[in-house]
Amino acid sequence: DKIKFSEAFQVFKTLLIYLEKENIKTCQLKLLPEIYTSLPNNEISYLLFKVNAALLRKDLTSVIDYTNQLSIDSSNRKRGIKKGIKNGLEVKEESDLSSFWNEILIPNLKFTHDTKPVHSAEEIMKLKEKFPNNIKQFNVYYNDTLVGGTTIFESNNVAHAQYISANTDKQKLGTLDFLFNYLINEKFKNKSFFDFGISNENQGQQINEGLLAWKESFGARSIVHEFYEIETKNHHLLNDLYL
């Protein structure tokens, strides 16, 4: 809250000058979405305009705004939540993330997309140790068997679902519908925003339509993550900034 435009300007300009001296011709920057900040902070966005930064990519993320929360009107979501209740599903917050990683997330990503999580089980556990109050794991159990879950990255304003996955019985059991209804309407109802994460593939060029529709059916709506590329030599365009 003590950083004003002049400080942000000096940091930005100094960075570009340093990178140019190190013979780094371009740098890429992803802007922090405004929902994650506690104060207005578009200083960098303005400075990107001044140095002719090129927009490289946009990702679409689905967000619930608790100040204007939409009710769930999807019959599929309501049916899934009822299935979860009928099947006696149980949501537990866990300190150990390895079960979700090894039993659900890794096998599911391998089978569905032939990919791996961005974080290995060891990496996410190290992050959890460093940020125990910000990284939280919520697992869903059916008759004491792990059937799905999500890893939440929690900040002051936002609960962000970093990883979401469930086994092949998710439709029959209502696993994810039950889980996210609990997280949105009970666990994190006092946050400002609930962020489901992006639904893009292929560097933002395409959208997973079914995934996006599922998120929107909870009342989420879209904001974007913006990625820019800057030519470091363009720091000279900042020289005439102030009158």
Image: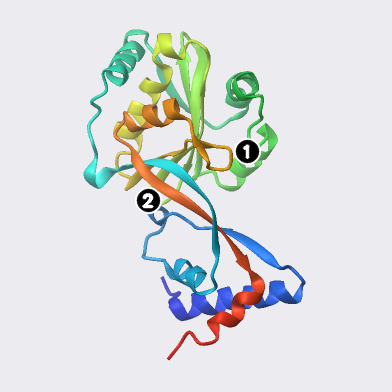
Q: Amino acid at mark 1?
A: Ile
Q: Which residue is mark 1?
A: 124
The answer to whether residue 54 is above or below residue 73 is below
What's the residue type where badge 2 is placed? Asn
Outermost residue, bottom side: 243
Q: Which mark is residue 157?
A: 2
Q: Is residue 114 left or right of residue 216?
A: right
Q: Mark on residue 243?
A: none
Q: Quadrant of residue 89?
A: top left
Secondary structure under badge 1? helix
- Which residue is at the front of the view, 32 or 152? 32
The quarter of the picture where residue 101 lies is: top right
Nearest to the observer: residue 106 or residue 127: 106
| Percent position of residue 142, x then y | 45, 11
Q: Quadrant of residue 154?
A: top left
In the picture, the quarter occupied by the C terminus is: bottom left
Give the percent coordinates (x, y) of residue 217.
31, 28
What residue is rendered at 69% in x and 75% in y?
Answer: 18
Which sits in the foreground, 22 or 156? 22
Q: Quadrant of the N terminus?
A: bottom left
Q: Position of residue 7 (x, y in %)?
A: 50, 78
Decide: is 239 above or below 32.
below
